[in-house]
Image (tube, grey):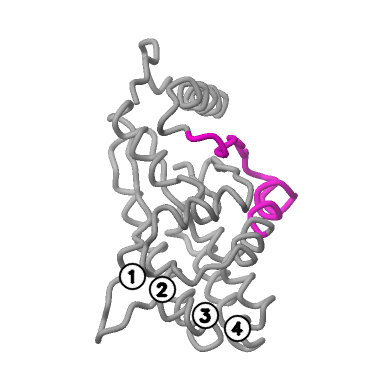
Amino acid sequence: MYLIEGNIGAGKSTFLELIQAHWPHIEVAFEPVNAWQKEEHGQSLLQNFYTNPQRWAYSMESFTLINRIIDNNRQQTTSRTITLAERSIYSGFHCFAKNSFLNQYMSPIEWNIYKQWFDFLTKHSDFRKPKGFIYLRTSPEVAYQRIIKRSRSAENLISLDYVTQIHLRHEELLLSATISDLPVLVLDANLEFNSNSQVLTDMFLKLEQFLKQNGQTHPTHQSIEIQV
């Protein structure tokens, strides 16, 4: 299993949809974002977090942690050789939850409880460690413009400052020694790869080489001809 990581608005879901279309034998797992956007008792947990992060950060991050562990267990049952999953328990901890703590959205005791859960779950015998990360790297400005363009109701309170903070947390996680024991492929996602066949082809070729270098079978046995 490989993890697709990147800021809000980096294009992770779009990239996975394109992989699914061109390499259908690769298992693709999308982030269960509808789970925390779903309105329970008339409320969306994600909307609540952006409206009042001090009140909802711990609830939000705890719920996403649970969902990502469930997905991790589910992805172990696939019969396909390669699985690409959108986001992970790692970015949940190192990017979003850590950022909430640094902004004092989480109290020290909430952060320590969350860390204990993270440590326990990642060291549990059933936890499946990834084989590597694919980082869709964008500038905060590009990511923010995409968030505005897609205009999701739950995201209408996101600021450029917050997107910049999350960008820095991803840089710390994926370009530092935090996960030095796992390989990381960095792809420039600033360009609109979903509407530029040459950019997408180049990204796919880099991904193909990355998987091959890390012991995976060749994703495709024919030349890549991308139509977008």
Instruction: Return the residue at label 4.
Output: 106
Q: Say what amino acid the circle numbered 4 marks.
A: Met
Task: Give the residue at the far top of this rendering.
Answer: 223
Q: Is residue 177 left or right of residue 84?
A: right
Q: Are marks 4 and 3 in contact (CB under 8 Å)?
A: yes
Q: Which residues are magenta?
A: 169-192
**CA neighbours of label 3 inside 10 A, class few (<14), some (14 to 19), many (20+):** many
- State which quarter of the image contains the N terminus: top left
Instruction: Return the residue at label 2.
Output: 46
Query: Gap in Å between the C-alphas at discs 3 and 2?
Result: 9 Å
Q: Is residue 43 left or right of residue 2?
A: left
Q: Are marks 1 and 3 in contact (CB under 8 Å)?
A: no
- Which picture quadrant has residue 95? bottom right
Q: Nearer the viewer's eye, disc 3 or disc 2?
A: 2
Q: Earlier in the sequence, mark 4 or mark 3?
A: 3
Q: Earlier in the sequence, mark 1 or mark 3?
A: 1
